[in-house]
Amino acid sequence: MNQLPYDPRYERLINHYLEHDYGASEEFFSPQEINSFRTLAIEAYREEEFRLAGIGNRFQVLKEKTIRSDKILWLDKKSVDPILLNFFKQIDEYVSYLNISCYAGIRSYEFHYAIYEKGSFYRRHSDQFRNSDQRTFSMVLYLTEDWRKGDGGELVIYKEIDGVEERVLIEPKAGKLIFFNSSLEHEVLESHERRISLTGWLRTT
Ligand code: OGA
Ligand code: NI
């Protein structure tokens, strides 16, 4: 495998992850890229390409509106849309970086857009399911334009420190990327405005 050049953006994200159990970055994608991802999501949403999300993995879906009420659209890795090509190219780079610098053993990934309309939420859960599909890392990229305090839809990550549970509240501001181990429990608080994100999982299978 080729040696990748040292990338301070990835280093900061990975170091934050190692220190805090979750990585946070506001420099992974440029503001222009964030706008392009959001525009694409809104267009597809208008075309009614989103579906009510279920729980379980993408092959075994149980519709359960009391647990989550967002709508999702899986991204097609074979898409030739230049916006998605750029997105996947950068994800590929990051995955290579993780594999080379941290021996992460990531072999595949899957991503979907998610839109939480007013009143939507995703109750406390972990992203590793019983019919384990080897989700190792979860990544969430926020796309909501002009998120403000009071708009809701914060991500809550539950960490355990010396046997004591700690709640970390993350504001879903456009451009922010969050990276955590898929076994960590987390929750999306009720959103009071439309909330747009791109969520994905890096897998070892
Ligand atoms: C998920 C999830 C978190 C977020 O889709 O599994 O937990 O902040 N998303 O959107
Ligand atoms: Ni989740």
Image: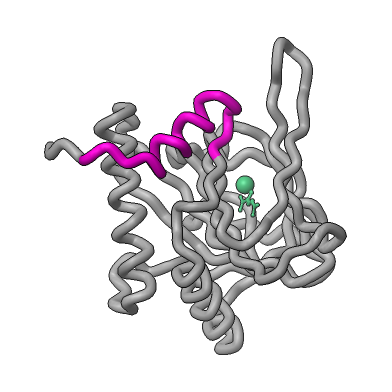
Prevalent SS, magenta region: helix
Between 186 and 68, the one lying in front of the other is 186
Which residue is at the far top? 162
Between 141 and 33, the one lying in front of the other is 33
Between 71 and 4, the one lying in front of the other is 4
Eyeballing the image, is 62 above or below 9? Answer: below
Q: Going by the image, does 4 lie left or right of 142? A: left
Percent across and percent down for residue 105 are: 30, 33
Instruction: Please tell me whether residue 99 belongs to the stretch shown in magenta.
Output: no
User: Which quarter shows the C terminus?
Assistant: top left
**Residue at x 58% of width, y 67% of height:** 72
Percent across and percent down for residue 177 are: 54, 51
> Is residue 205 in view from this perspective?
no
Which residue is at the far right? 150
Which residue is at the far left? 2
Percent across and percent down for residue 50 are: 58, 76
Q: In the figure, residue 14 lies in which quadrant? A: top left
Which residue is at the far bottom? 47
> Is residue 168 in view from this perspective?
yes
User: Which quarter shows the N terminus?
Assistant: top left
Q: Going by the image, does 32 lie left or right of 118? A: left
Start-end of magenta stretch: 5-23
How is the model colour-coded?
Answer: one colour
Number of marks in picture: 0
**Residue at x 69% of width, y 27% of height:** 159
Between 160 and 9, the one lying in front of the other is 9
Q: Going by the image, does 141 lie left or right of 151? A: left
**Residue at x 35% of width, y 37% of height:** 204
Percent across and percent down for residue 99 are: 29, 34
Eyeballing the image, is 169 above or below 144? Answer: above
Instruction: Please tell me whether residue 19 belongs to the stretch shown in magenta.
Output: yes
**Residue at x 32% of width, y 76% of height:** 82
